């Protein structure tokens, strides 16, 4: 079973990498092996290819002159040479000699001491010096039979030259006489039908004895072989026939020698093609500054300073490609990448997939050497809007069909890449379906990276074990992407900010915020604030510790050191206001309040809905008032008449509804509303089941116009 289908590999950019490899090949055999090149799962095979490629890469870096040329595909010639009594041409024999010479030079050049892994291939090359010598004796380097190929051929050619010269002299003498007599139409001897002739005017053809071999297109010139030259011409033709027979005999003997070593030559061609492809990989790796990362036995992807091979091939400048740092495997099996369009989400995902393919094909990749990769048994890809005409599927149906195939085969060792999961249909239903699929992928043990714009998946990634958020940072001031990947942090869409920058209209944007809902809009603004704060904090850490962004084996040490960083000469100020768990505060004066859910000395864990963030307490200031609704927490004060439980787990939803009912009964409310959404219907069913058993609930209903809401009447 193939690790990845050609179509899926093409979506990741593998076709461009293969095209770059093809440019580095020097032989048809290498091109043939490139067409058959596929990623493999066996660690031993991959490490062997990588080691051999690295050896060639070092030789290229030293500008060594490698004997990698004259690789000609002579398989068709060998097939013609196999039958007994067959005869190949002198040019084809010279091609075989060049292949034998190439095999010999490669075998001698790659020595075990310097190229231990390459020798595993090249030591199987057969040196055919005897065949080389035999061909060299009968054929020159221009592919012509040598005059001294045999004594008989030498004798024939000497006599042939003598007779040809005598014939030429005689014909030229007759031509001069014809010119003097005014019979010749031209002053040059020519050849017609392999015979020397002179051009005569048509009206003079009866004034000279001989044989007419041709006439000009106008009919005004005839080409005549003088009768006096007939005997000399016949002697030349006989000697030419003898020469051809002797040459055929010589070539037939040489072909017999080739026949003896046909199997060895065929094997040599295959090995030379392998070396050619390894050399092309090394040249491409040298061009991309590729290295061999740590090959892990477990299925992990720890990418450090990884750069997109596609971008490197396009720009040709490593400095123009933003490095990617991403970790997948172990506790984190699924990565949900969010953020605005054109921010680099898909490029980051494709980079991981393409690096995995290249590595599994034995190509060093553009990452830091401390990166760690486990080989994937299968790589599944769902990218792009593709309809299926054959199966009569719409774009969304085609995507669902692709997810179905993935869910069936997802297992440990599988790498799954899905772009814009859950799109192409109703957003709420698409998000629910996407979450269900991601739960299946995560439970299967596969490693998964998906990109999405669904906000509910950000909450899902934050809450569910084995799933983590990720995003590409965005410059809030310029509203432009930085293409820097941040693991563990969800990305904001910046839709409203971009709309404001594009001057869409305040009334339109304000109305959009109303339609989106106060809670959702506040969450989006909070995420934007978190992103800005994170960017500023990262910049400050870079100033204090310039080495922090360099990957090495001391990441954990630097992480511990980072916790103790202080600006020199300043003690940490003590907070002027006492804070408590449950209190609503602003972070760095931000517009949206957050709730303190944990306090530990100088550190506080704050939350807004499903978002969590750990901050220093000196960055917090008390909010003037608390929000009326907080996801998962009832706020004391005015009685609550409505509760939004969309995105809740079933148990948490029922607990929140229980608090709402108790509070409403104590406050004497006649009714309360629960917003559970439509989704899969699980939350609605759980709420209704709970309400059926509550004595204080007289009745409840879901209005036909709004099935995502339940109104409960209280006793």
Image (cartoon, rainbow, N blue to C red):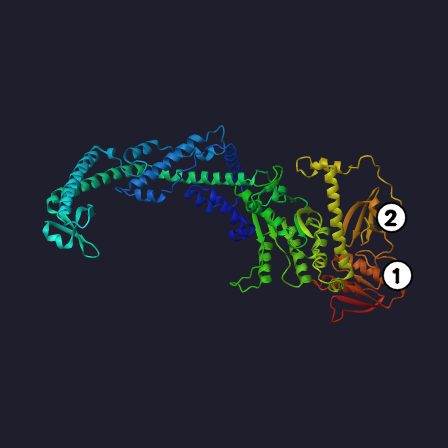
Q: On the rendered structure, is 375 left or right of 431?
A: left
Please give left or right for residue 664 compared with residue 7 in the image: right
Can residue 690 be seen by looking at this rendering?
A: yes
Which part of the image, by quadrant, shows the C terminus?
bottom right
Tag 2 residue: 580
Q: Residue 553: x and y, percent? A: 66, 35
State the mark number for residue 490: none
Crowding around mark 1 (Cα neighbors within 10 Å: few <14, some 14 to 19, many 20+) is few
Judging depth in this view, the residue of 420 and 565 nearest the camera is 565
Question: Residue 113: x, y in percent?
Answer: 49, 28
Q: Nearer the viewer, residue 390 or 217?
A: 217
The picture quadrant where one finds residue 570 is top right
Q: Earlier in the sequence, mark 1 or mark 2?
A: 2
How far is the residue under mark 1 from the one under mark 2?
21 Å
Observer-nearest of 622 and 40: 622
Q: In percent of the image, x 75 and y 64: which residue is there? A: 507
- Mark 2 closeness class: few <14, some 14–19, many ≥20 residues within 10 Å: few
Q: Residue furthest top?
A: 113
Residue 376 visible at all:
no
**Callout 1 secondary element:** loop
Image coordinates of residue 557 in percent, x first then y, are: 72, 35
Above-or-below relation of 557 to 424: above
Relative to 120, say whether 20 is above or below. below
Examine the rendered structure and indicate whether residue 704 appears above or below residue 463: below
x and y percent of residue 488 in the render?
71, 47
Report the side of 613 relative to 372 (left or right).
right
Q: Is residue 558 above or below residue 604?
A: above
Q: Which residue is denoted by mark 1 in the rendering?
A: 638
Question: What's the residue at 54%, 62% (across, down)?
Answer: 388
Residue at 88% x, 61% y: name it: 638
Q: Is the residue under label 2 in contact with that under label 1 (CB below 8 Å)? A: no
SS under mark 2: loop
């Amino acid at each position: 079973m193939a690790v990845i289908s050609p179509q899926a590999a093409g979506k990741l950019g593998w076709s461009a990498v293969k095209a770059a490899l093809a440019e580095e090949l020097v032989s048809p055999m290498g091109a043939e092996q490139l067409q058959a090149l596929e990623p493999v799962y066996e660690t031993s095979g991959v490490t062997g290819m990588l080691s051999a490629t690295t050896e060639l890469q070092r030789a290229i870096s030293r500008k060594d002159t490698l004997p990698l040329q004259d690789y000609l595909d002579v398989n068709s010639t060998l097939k013609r040479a196999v039958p007994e009594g067959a005869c190949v041409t002198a040019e084809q024999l010279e091609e075989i000699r060049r292949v034998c010479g190439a095999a010999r030079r490669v075998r001698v050049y790659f020595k075990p001491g310097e190229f231990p892994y390459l020798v595993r291939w090249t030591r199987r090359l057969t040196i055919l010096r005897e065949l080389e010598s035999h061909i060299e004796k009968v054929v020159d380097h221009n592919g012509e039979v040598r005059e001294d190929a045999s004594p008989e051929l030498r004798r024939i050619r000497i006599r042939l030259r003598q007779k040809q010269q005598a014939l030429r002299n005689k014909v030229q003498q007759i031509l001069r006489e014809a010119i003097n007599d005014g019979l010749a139409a031209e002053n040059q001897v020519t050849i017609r039908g392999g015979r020397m002739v002179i051009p005569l005017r048509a009206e003079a053809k009866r004034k000279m004895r001989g044989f007419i071999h041709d006439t000009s297109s106008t009919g005004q010139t005839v080409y005549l072989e003088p009768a006096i030259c007939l005997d000399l011409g016949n002697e030349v033709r006989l000697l030419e026939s003898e020469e051809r027979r002797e040459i055929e005999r010589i070539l037939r003997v040489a072909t017999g020698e080739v026949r003896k070593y046909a199997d060895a030559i065929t094997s040599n061609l295959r090995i030379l093609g392998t070396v050619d492809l390894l050399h092309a990989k090394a040249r491409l790796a040298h061009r991309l500054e590729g290295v061999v990362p740590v090959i892990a036995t477990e299925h992990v992807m720890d990418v450090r300073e990884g750069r997109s091979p596609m971008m490197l091939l396009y720009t040709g400048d490593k400095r123009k490609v933003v490095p990617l740092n991403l970790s997948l495997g172990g506790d984190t099996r699924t990565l949900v990448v969010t953020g605005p369009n054109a921010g680099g989400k898909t490029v980051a995902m494709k980079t991981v997939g393409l690096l995995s393919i290249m590595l599994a094909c034995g190509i060093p990749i553009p990452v830091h050497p401390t990166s760690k990769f486990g080989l994937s048994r299968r790589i599944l890809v769902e990218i792009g809007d593709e309809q299926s005409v054959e199966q009569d599927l719409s774009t969304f149906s085609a995507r669902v069909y692709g997810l179905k195939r993935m869910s069936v085969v997802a297992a440990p060792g599988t790498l799954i890449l899905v772009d814009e999961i859950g799109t192409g249909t109703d957003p709420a239903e698409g998000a629910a379906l996407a979450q269900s699929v991601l739960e299946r992928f995560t439970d299967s043990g596969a490693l998964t990276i998906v990109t999405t714009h669904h906000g509910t998946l950000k909450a899902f990634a934050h809450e569910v074990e084995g799933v983590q958020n990720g995003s590409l940072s965005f410059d809030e001031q310029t509203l432009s992407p930085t293409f820097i990947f941040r693991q563990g942090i969800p990305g904001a869409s910046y839709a409203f900010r971009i709309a404001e920058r594009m001057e869409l209209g305040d009334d339109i944007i304000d109305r959009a915020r109303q339609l989106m809902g106060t809670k959702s809009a506040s969450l989006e603004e909070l995420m934007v604030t978190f992103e800005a704060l994170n960017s500023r904090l990262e910049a400050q850490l870079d100033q204090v510790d310039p080495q922090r962004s360099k990957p090495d084996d001391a990441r954990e040490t630097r992480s511990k050191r980072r916790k103790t960083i202080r600006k020199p000469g300043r003690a940490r100020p003590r907070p002027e206001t006492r804070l408590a768990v449950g209190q609503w505060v602003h972070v760095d004066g931000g517009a949206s309040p957050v709730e303190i859910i944990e306090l530990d000395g100088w550190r506080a864990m704050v939350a807004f809905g499903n978002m969590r963030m750990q901050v220093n307490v000196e960055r917090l200031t008390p909010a003037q008032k608390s929000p009326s609704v907080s996801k998962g927490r009832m706020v004391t004060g005015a009685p609550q008449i409505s509760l939004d439980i969309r995105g809740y787990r079933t148990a948490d939803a029922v607990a929140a509804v229980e608090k709402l009912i108790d509070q409403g009964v104590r406050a004497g409310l006649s009714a309360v509303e629960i917003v559970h959404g439509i989704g899969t219907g699980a939350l609605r069913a759980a709420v209704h089941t709970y309400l059926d058993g509550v004595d204080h609930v007289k009745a409840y209903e879901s209005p036909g116009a709004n099935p995502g809401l339940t109104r409960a009447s209280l006793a």
